[in-house]
Image (spheres, helix red, strand yellow):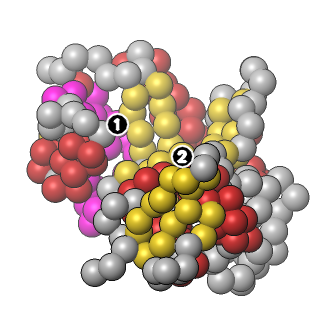
């Protein structure tokens, strides 16, 4: 088990979050091309945890790489997966922390009626967790729809997030019901600044702010994004004029 500082991408994420560096209590244990036997992994992990402060979360990614002692382990076998999950749960009880597991969806072209039914393998993967989060592609490029299912409390509403390296950011302006259909290409991400520059005329022509927003909104640019982009461009790429209570714009001469 090693600290997150050994991974440049983890450092990038931490700095982008406004931290001074990787948290000291974040540890990674890469097992790629190593032993995946569940019993051996848990025994080694317990020994490792003896010398450390209790963790708040243990996250296993991906879960299907761990195997029980059964030589014919099959993720489609309910008995095998139940044994796997129960063994992991016992470890959580011993370490007094939350257990999180990452699993993959089945590779099918059809769209499930419930996103939580899309997990590959045995149905135990869906029934066992106290809370599950499923991720499906949004029609917008680099965006995902997160859906939540809680066993003992009200489930949060679906939301959209966007991978904007090195962070994953919330996209409250996007509709979580607009999931990408199987086989469809993602809709290319549009930069509001590029759209604005496309429609602002050169001197001596000018365009009013309201007219400019009306055009940009037809390109699916939301008002907050429009105003933010306009502020960034004003004085650098475009020139604003304030006359008689109205604001107009033209391309700034280079």
**Quadrant position of the N terminus in the picture:** top left
Query: In the displayed structure, does residue 152 sit left or right of residue 66?
Result: right
Residue 99 spot, x, y in % from top left: 48, 31
- The circle on residue 248 is none
- The circle on residue 170 is 2
Determine which quarter of the picture holds residue 41. Answer: top left
Q: Residue at x 81, y 68 (%)?
A: 111
**C-beta proximity under 8 Å, tags 2 and 1:** no
Determine which quarter of the picture holds residue 22. Answer: top left
First in sequence, mark 2 or 1: give its number: 1
Q: Is residue 47 magenta?
A: yes
**Quadrant position of the C terminus in the picture:** bottom left
Q: Nearer the viewer, residue 228 or 157?
A: 228
> For mark 2, does the 10 Å Cα neighbourhood hold few (<14), some (14 to 19), or many (20 or more) residues?
some
Q: Magenta segment, which residues?
A: 24-48
Indicate the secondary structure of the residue bearing disc 2. Answer: strand
Indicate the secondary structure of the residue bearing disc 1. Answer: helix
Q: Nearer the viewer, residue 115 or 140?
A: 140
Q: Residue at x 12, y 50 (%)?
A: 6
Query: In the displayed structure, does residue 115 sit left or right of residue 125?
Result: right
| Residue mark closest to the camera, 2 vs 1 | 2
> For mark 1, does the 10 Å Cα neighbourhood hold few (<14), some (14 to 19), or many (20 or more) residues?
some
Residue 142 spot, x, y in % from top left: 52, 67
Residue at mark 1: 42
Query: In the displayed structure, does residue 188 sit left or right of residue 66?
Result: right
CA separation, marks 2 and 1? 35 Å
Q: Residue at x 51, y 53 (%)?
A: 242
Query: In the displayed structure, does residue 50 sit left or right of residue 193?
Result: left
Q: Is residue 142 visible?
A: no
Q: Is residue 192 magenta?
A: no
| Vertical placement of residue 74 versus 85, above or below | below
Residue 63 spot, x, y in % from top left: 49, 51
């Amino acid at each position: 088990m090693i600290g997150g500082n050994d991974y440049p991408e983890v450092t990038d994420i931490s700095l982008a979050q406004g931290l001074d560096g990787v948290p000291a209590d974040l540890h990674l244990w890469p097992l790629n091309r190593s032993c995946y036997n569940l019993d051996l992994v848990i025994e080694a992990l317990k020994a490792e945890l003896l010398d450390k402060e209790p963790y708040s979360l243990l996250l296993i990614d991906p879960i299907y790489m761990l195997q029980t002692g059964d030589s014919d382990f099959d993720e489609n076998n309910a008995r095998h997966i139940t044994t796997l999950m129960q063994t992991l749960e016992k470890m959580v009880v011993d370490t007094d922390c939350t257990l999180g597991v990452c699993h993959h969806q089945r590779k099918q072209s059809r769209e499930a009626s419930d996103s939580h039914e899309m997990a590959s393998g045995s149905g135990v993967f869906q029934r066992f967790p106290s809370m599950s989060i499923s991720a499906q592609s949004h029609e917008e490029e680099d965006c995902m729809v997160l859906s939540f299912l809680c066993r003992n409390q009200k489930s949060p509403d679906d939301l959209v997030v966007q991978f904007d390296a090195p962070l994953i950011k919330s996209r409250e302006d996007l509709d979580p019901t607009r999931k990408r259909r199987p086989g469809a290409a993602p809709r290319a991400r549009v930069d509001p600044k590029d759209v604005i520059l496309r429609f602002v005329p050169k001197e001596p022509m000018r365009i009013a702010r309201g007219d400019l927003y009306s055009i940009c909104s037809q390109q699916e640019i939301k008002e907050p994004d429009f105003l933010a982009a306009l502020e960034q461009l004003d004085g650098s790429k475009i020139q604003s004029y304030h006359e008689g209570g109205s604001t107009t714009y033209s391309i700034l001469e280079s």
